[in-house]
């Protein structure tokens, strides 16, 4: 039973909750203030009633520690819980999102003070202004003239791909400072401060899910009483429908791929359209992932960036591991590519990096998806097509299957989606168009009278 002690006009109520692992007694304390004007006896009676209700309410929350800050909880989650449930690169990405977007606002807040309305305001602000560190844009690409890209990247202590990304868009202050120092210029002379970009609804929703996972773990471990994310308003997802090529555009793309001189890229384009493979999965393919006897492609790895380096790793989910039967034409392309690669590897035996890799750069190392995107956009321009992203070829594959009346479950399995809901949500606009055509076909066949 809780102890009650009168302190002036209030009562201090203490509930004893047993002992912890070190033998220290656990206790919870609260304060009750009776209504004005009641007698001393009535006030004491109300305090006892309040204590009984309060003690019953906290029963089962022995380890509650809602006075710790969110920063302390985040550190506990990512160092104690997350390593056993997330892959290293996924953990790094998720934690980076939380530290960039959530920590500046909630880091010093006590857990008991974090409420759903507070999160609503935070998510709205993220969609409005990004609430992240400011971004910087290179004033003039000519500032890098005279520097070999790899040498400059090494001098700045960044990846070569990061340097190319900076030349195409914006970057963080930290990266901008490294590049400015490498070329011997002050930051404000080399880069423009372009402010904080707003986040899309999809990006904010992803952050909300990551934040909710932290709070859910805290509730399970009885650190918090409830997860405030569960009552927060979901961010409005304003992601445009997935872009893709139609059947005629796909044929035009394949024709242009055949005409351009890079045979390996022709094989890559055909494989994307034939399988819906992800960019990271394609870059991680080894020759033993392809069974030329049965015509089956086994997808069991993906390329991820870990500590600044690209490494071959297993996928995030079990559903991403799958087998896909390849068309005969694509198998023939792969056989020819394997033969040509073997000849090239023989010429460059002393520098060839990864002989097992299906697709490689000029020194036999793994390809990087961002470089493939540059090539695809060039081919699209040559074909007079919209300059879509490499991932759009995956969407094109899905749309061709949908328009071919392939079942959603089969499409989900082929794409490596965990549920058909993901497939239906991602391609809802394609399914809607397909259903409309199906309805029109039935209408014409059965319900339109011959004129």
Image (cartoon, rainbow, N blue to C red):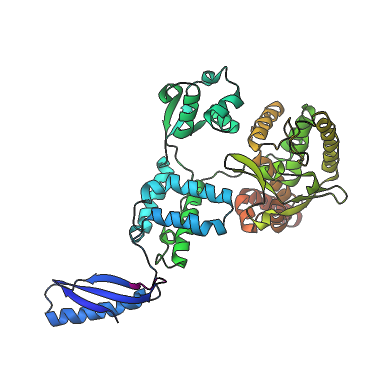
Look at the image and tell me in which quarter the N terminus lies.
Answer: bottom left
Query: Is residue 449 in view from this perspective?
Result: no
Seen at 65% across and 48% down, the residue is: 430
Q: Is residue 219 left or right of residue 347?
A: left
Q: What residue range appears in magenta?
A: 21-26
Comparing 241 with 57, the one in front is 57
Seen at 85% across and 32% down, the residue is: 343
Query: Is residue 242 in view from this perspective?
Result: yes
Q: How many marks?
A: 0
Magenta segment includes 385: no
Seen at 34% across and 72% down, the residue is: 26
Where residue 401 sits in the image (x, y, percent)?
73, 49
Where residue 443 sits in the image (x, y, percent)?
71, 54
Q: Is residue 157 left or right of residue 357?
A: left
Q: Is residue 94 left or right of residue 319?
A: left
Comparing 394 with 404, the one in front is 394
Q: Quadrant of residue 338?
A: top right
Q: Is residue 116 left or right of residue 253?
A: left
Residue furthest to the right:
293
Where residue 118 sits in the image (x, y, percent)?
35, 54
Q: Quadrant of residue 55?
A: bottom left
Q: Is residue 1 above or below residue 83?
A: below
Q: Is residue 426 above or below residue 225?
A: above
């Amino acid at each position: 039973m809780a102890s009650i002690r009168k302190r002036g006009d209030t009562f201090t109520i203490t509930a004893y909750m047993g002992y912890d692992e070190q033998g220290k007694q656990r206790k919870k304390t609260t304060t009750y203030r009776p209504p004005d004007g009641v007698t001393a006896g009535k006030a004491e009676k109300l305090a006892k009633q309040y204590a009984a209700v309060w003690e019953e309410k906290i029963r089962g929350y022995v380890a509650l520690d809602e006075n710790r800050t969110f920063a302390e909880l985040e550190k506990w989650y990512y160092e104690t819980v997350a390593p056993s449930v997330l892959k290293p690169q996924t953990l790094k990405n998720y934690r980076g999102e939380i530290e960039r977007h959530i920590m500046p606002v909630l880091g010093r807040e006590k857990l008991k003070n974090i409420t759903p309305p507070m999160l609503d305001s935070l998510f709205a602000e993220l969609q409005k202004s990004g609430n992240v560190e400011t971004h910087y844009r290179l004033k003039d690409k000519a500032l890098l003239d005279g520097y070999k890209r790899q040498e400059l990247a090494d001098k700045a202590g960044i990846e070569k791909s990061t340097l190319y990304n900076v030349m195409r868009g914006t970057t963080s202050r930290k990266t901008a400072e490294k590049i400015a120092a490498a070329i011997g210029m002050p930051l404000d002379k080399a880069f423009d401060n372009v402010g904080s970009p707003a986040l899309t609804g999809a990006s904010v929703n992803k952050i909300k899910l990551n934040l909710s996972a932290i709070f859910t773990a805290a509730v399970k471990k009885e650190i918090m009483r409830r997860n405030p994310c569960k009552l927060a308003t979901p961010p409005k997802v304003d992601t445009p429908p997935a872009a893709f090529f139609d059947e005629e555009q796909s044929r035009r793309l394949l024709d242009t791929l055949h005409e351009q001189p890079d045979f390996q890229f022709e094989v890559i384009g055909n494989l994307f359209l034939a399988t819906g493979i992800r960019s990271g999965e394609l870059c991680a393919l080894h020759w033993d992932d392809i069974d030329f006897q049965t015509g089956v492609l086994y997808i069991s790895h993906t390329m991820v960036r870990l500590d600044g380096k690209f490494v071959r790793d297993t996928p995030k989910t079990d559903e991403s591991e799958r087998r896909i039967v390849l068309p005969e034409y694509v198998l023939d392309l792969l056989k020819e590519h394997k033969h040509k690669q073997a000849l090239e590897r023989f010429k460059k035996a002393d520098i060839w990096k990864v002989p097992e890799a299906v697709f490689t750069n000029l020194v036999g190392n793994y390809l990087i998806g961002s470089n493939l995107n540059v090539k695809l956009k060039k081919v699209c321009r040559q074909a007079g097509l919209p300059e879509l992203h490499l991932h759009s070829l995956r969407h094109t594959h899905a749309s061709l299957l949908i328009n071919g009346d392939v079942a959603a479950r089969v499409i989900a399995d082929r794409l490596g989606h965990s549920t058909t809901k993901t497939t239906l949500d991602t391609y809802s606009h394609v399914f809607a168009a397909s259903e409309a055509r199906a309805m029109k076909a039935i209408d014409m066949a059965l319900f339109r009278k011959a004129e």
